[in-house]
Amino acid sequence: MKHLLKLLDVTTEEIEEILNLADQLKYELKHGIEHHHLKGKTLGMIFAKASTRTRVSFETGMYQLGGYPMYLSANDMQIGRGEPIEDTARVLSRYLDGIMIRTFEQKQVEDLAEYGSIPVINALTDFAHPCQVLADLMTIRERKGALEGLKACYIGDGNNMMHSIIVGCLKMGMSVSVACPEGYRPDKEVLDFASQYECFEMTDSPAIAAKDADVLFTDVWASMGQEGEAAQRRKAFEGYQINAELMKLAKPDAMVQHCLPAHRGEEITADVFEAHAQEIFDEAENRLHAQKAVLVTLMK
Ligand code: CP
Ligand code: NVA
């Protein structure tokens, strides 16, 4: 594995290795066992969108690994003024040991990897959020013991989160059922991948998707960059909510996962969120451990 651009590129075995290493690094951290695998290495962290979890977990993770995290705001870089990504990639490759990037277009991340000569990590694009879903898989495995055979359901927008959940969960042997309104379905590339699996289902009914689910996912109705569509989306997604009624259809011990930030009263009700807060904040914590595993895998 040279980069982490999207889960479509990663094999089941590679995901499993990352999850195993993440568990080990978490154990070591909790027991005060030093793991300076990236001593002397620098990670450039380019952000063209806001972030709380991603920035703090990558920065802390790099520090815990003995390396140096360098925060770079895309607006303050020359890419913000039109410098080509090809040149940015070749320049940064002369200074850094790895790049983490959060931006809009997936192509920008792919180009950074193509023209640079160091590992590139996608820390969210409009197309994918692979780091988040590695943390989600880690959290589910921690609680349920294994992933294979579990049913995941996702209610809401066919966005970066839905894409990575579909691919990640199917690759790990889970069945996946997604509910989304027409006009907000996942990307064709993801649907083409998912269509190879009999255990994939897409419906416009949250009730069908949630039936007997072991894990329920949702995400905001309007993602970063879509703020102008918020009102229209609120209408389109009415009813696409994880609430107490929907939870009754899932397995009695079903988990809820939310990448956060959450909009209570929209994609999830406050009562369901609070009832599952423990596993949702475990999920947020596991961003740290899963990403450290990615960093070590790519940069050691
Ligand atoms: N889940 C997630 O990526 O959070 P941030 O946007 O705060 O980084
Ligand atoms: N779909 C959301 C995820 C945030 C972590 C967004 O792109 O804004």
Image (spheres, helix red, strand yellow):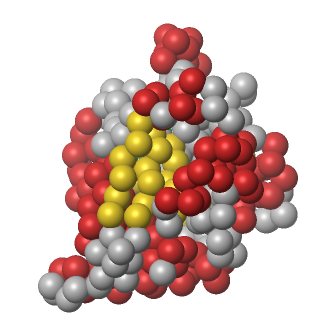
The mark tally for this picture is 0
249 horizontally vs 261: left or right: right
Residue occupying image coordinates x 34% and y 58%: 69
Residue occupying image coordinates x 31% and y 31%: 264
Could you say where residue 249 lies in the image, as x and y percent from the top left? 47, 51
Front residue of 209 and 74? 74
Can I make out residue 89 in this image? yes
Residue 66 lies in quadrant: bottom left
Residue occupying image coordinates x 63% and y 32%: 83
Front residue of 228 and 147? 228
Can I make out residue 201 in this image? no
Could you say where residue 100 lies in the image, as x and y percent from the top left? 49, 54
Using the image, determine if residue 280 lies above or below residue 224: below
Could you say where residue 96 lies in the image, as x and y percent from the top left? 49, 61
Using the image, determine if residue 100 lies above or below residue 26: above
Which quarter of the rendered picture does the N terminus lie within?
A: bottom right
Could you say where residue 138 lies in the image, as x and y percent from the top left? 43, 71
Using the image, determine if residue 58 lies above or below residue 154: below
Residue occupying image coordinates x 29% and y 52%: 56
Front residue of 206 and 200? 200
In the image, farthest residue toward the left: 32
